Image (cartoon, rainbow, N blue to C red):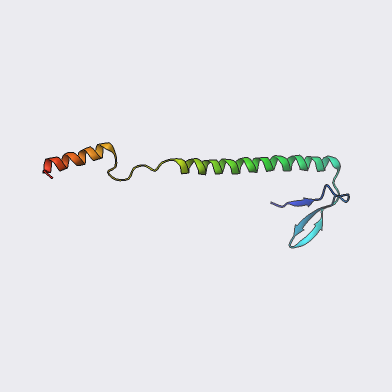
Amino acid sequence: MQQSLGNWKFACQSHYWIRQNRVVDAGMMTKQKIEAVKVKDKIDNQRYIAQANRAAEAKHSSAKRPAPPQGDTGVGAILVKKLRSWFKGS
């Protein structure tokens, strides 16, 4: 990905690239092209935010789920344990 920088709000409306730590002038852009870039940037930003929100929600919802029981903690397991103990006479 190669991203350019545009200063559309300044009078100069400069547009440039940074390549190998050097500023490279990208030339002037028409108002129509500037508007098209702004629209694309806005859509890209909305997609990024939606993706980040989905990832955060998935992480949050998985953290809320209780962990499955470990070992002999279920009602059936406890009943079996008590029956074994009773049969052994303990």
The spot of residue 29 in percent (x, y) is 85, 46
In the image, farthest residue toward the right? 11
The reply, left or right, for residue 84 in relation to residue 38 is left
Name the quarter where the C terminus is drawn.
Answer: top left
* Number of on-image labels: 0
The reply, left or right, for residue 60 in relation to residue 67 is right
The spot of residue 88 in percent (x, y) is 12, 43
Q: Residue at x 29, y 45 (%)?
A: 71
In the image, farthest residue toward the left? 89
The spot of residue 48 in percent (x, y) is 64, 43
Front-lying residue, 30 or 73:
73
Kindly indicate the quadrant of the structure image that contains residue 78.
top left
The spot of residue 33 in percent (x, y) is 82, 42
Q: Residue at x 41, y 41 (%)?
A: 66
Q: Residue at x 20, y 42 (%)?
A: 81
In the image, farthest residue toward the front? 90
Kindly indicate the quadrant of the structure image that contains residue 25.
bottom right
Q: Residue at x 70, y 39 (%)?
A: 43
Front-lying residue, 33 or 8:
8
Front-lying residue, 13 or 58:
58
